[in-house]
Amino acid sequence: MYNLSLTLTDKQRERAEAKARELGYPNPDEYLHAVIDELLDDDAPTDVVAAVREALEDVRAGRTYPASDLRRLLESADDDG
């Protein structure tokens, strides 16, 4: 096991504690361990600039959805997973 020291501001600590409670973690340490695990397990790097450019291209090309259609599409994707 490796020990890592992390210094948080009061605001960061409060946010971590609140998020841990919200998500049902018994303490902020376990929540932060879960966050780190998720970040380390994410194999697909996110290129935010490329994603924004792609979204703008979709808008310019007319490949858009009304909000209500998009909401239904996203909800059906949640049901599949």
Image (cartoon, rainbow, N blue to C red):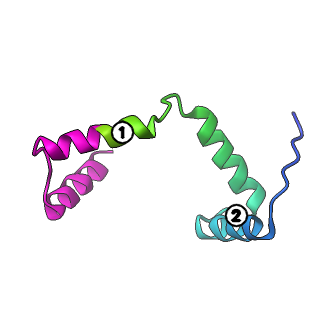
Q: Report the front residue among 66 and 3.
A: 66
**What span is colored magenta in the figure?**
54-81
Whether residue 21 sits left or right of residue 55 in the image: it is: right
Q: Which residue is mark 1?
A: 51
Q: Most extreme residue toward the left, as rendered? A: 62
Foreground mark, 1 or 2, reads 1
Amino acid bearing label 2: Ala
In the rendered image, the vertical position of residue 32 relative to residue 19, given as above or below: above
User: Measured from the top left, where is residue 32 in percent x and y?
Assistant: 71, 52
Q: Circle 1 sits in a helix, a strand or a loop, which is it? A: helix
Q: Quadrant of the C terminus?
A: top left
- Kindly report the secondary structure that dominates the magenta region of the rendered protein: helix
Q: Which residue is mark 2?
A: 16
Residue drawn at x 66%, y 71% as measured from the top left:
18
Q: Which mark is residue 41?
A: none
Residue drawn at x 10%, y 45% as measured from the top left:
62
Residues packed near mark 1 inside 10 Å, few (<14), some (14 to 19) or many (20 plus):
few
Q: Report the front residue among 6 and 61.
A: 61
User: Measured from the top left, where is residue 69 in percent x and y?
Assistant: 14, 58
Q: Earlier in the sequence, mark 1 or mark 2?
A: 2
Amino acid bearing label 1: Ala
In the rendered image, the vertical position of residue 71 relative to residue 80, given as above or below: below
Whether residue 56 sits left or right of residue 52 in the image: it is: left
Calculate the distance from the C-alpha at mark 1 to the C-alpha at mark 2: 28 Å
